[in-house]
Amino acid sequence: MHRLLLLLALALATPSSAQSARSLNTEGFRLYQAGKYPEALEKFQAAAQADPKLALAHYNVAATLGVLRKQGQVCQYEAYRDTILERLNTAVRLDPRRLTRAKEDADLDPIRDTVGWQRLLGRSPERLADVPEILRRVTWYSPGEGVYGSTRKLTFSAGQRVVLWRRVIEDEANPTRTEEVGGTYTLKGRTLTLSFPGKKPISGKMTPRGVLELEELGRFLDSPSECEA
C-alpha cells in the first residue's frame, strides 16, 4: 500500500509528457513571435520529442524550418525541403486539419514546388492524369556536383515552355556565372521531349516516383543538393 501511495504521489508531482510537450510548444511559439527562430525551433523539436503524437509541435517545426530556409540558414539548421515535408506529413497524418492551415501558411512557401507538396494536395506521379500538373508545379534540380551543389534546374510553364538554368562551373574566372536557355516541350503520357534553339531534341520521362530522367541532362529531383562539403 505504501509503495502504491508513493507511486501515486510521484505521478501527481511529475507533469506528463503531454503536458511537458504543450508547455514546450507554448514557449516555442512565444520565441517564434519574438522573431527568435533558432530558439523557437529548439523548443518545438523538444515538444515533438516529448510527445511524438502532438501534431502542432511537428507542424511548428516544419513552419520554423521554412522561415529559416527563407532566411538562407539552410545548412545551419538543416532546413532542407525534404525535412520540412517529413515534419509536415507527420503533422497532417496526426491531425488532417493541419493541411488546411498549411495551404495558407507563408512559412511553408519553400516547399510548394515539390513533389511532396503535390502529394499532400492529392496529386501523385503514379497517376498519368496528374503528371502534366506535377511537371509544371515542381522545380526540378540536378544532383549535386561537389561543393557546387545542384548546377542545373528546369522549370516548366503554360504554353509548353521550359527554361533550363545552369551554373557554369568551368568558368574559373567567374565561378558564380549562370545561364538560362528557353525552349519548348511536349509531354505524352510520361514521355517528355525538350527542344532548345540550335540543339537536338532531348527525350526523357517522369518516373512513377516523381523523378525526371532525361537523355544527356541526366536525372532531376524536386529538391536541390545543398550543404555538401
Image (cartoon, rainbow, N blue to C red):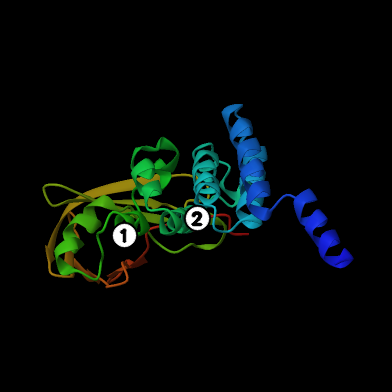
Q: Nearer the viewer, residue 118 or 16?
A: 16
Residue 129: image x %, image y %? 14, 64
Residue under pointer 2: 87
Residue 72 position by quadrant = top right
**Relative vertical location of residue 80 with respect to residue 174 in this rendering, above or below:** below
Residue 126: image x %, image y %? 24, 71
Q: For the residue marked with disc 2, what is the amino acid?
A: Arg
Residue 155 is at least partly visible in this image: no
Residue 63, numbered circle:
none
Q: Residue at x 61, y 42 (%)?
A: 25
The first of marks 2 and 1 along the sequence is 2
Residue 78: image x %, image y %? 59, 52
Element type at marker 2?
helix
Q: For the residue marked with disc 1, what is the amino acid?
A: Arg
Residue 119, numbered circle:
1
Q: Nearer the viewer, residue 71 or 155?
A: 71
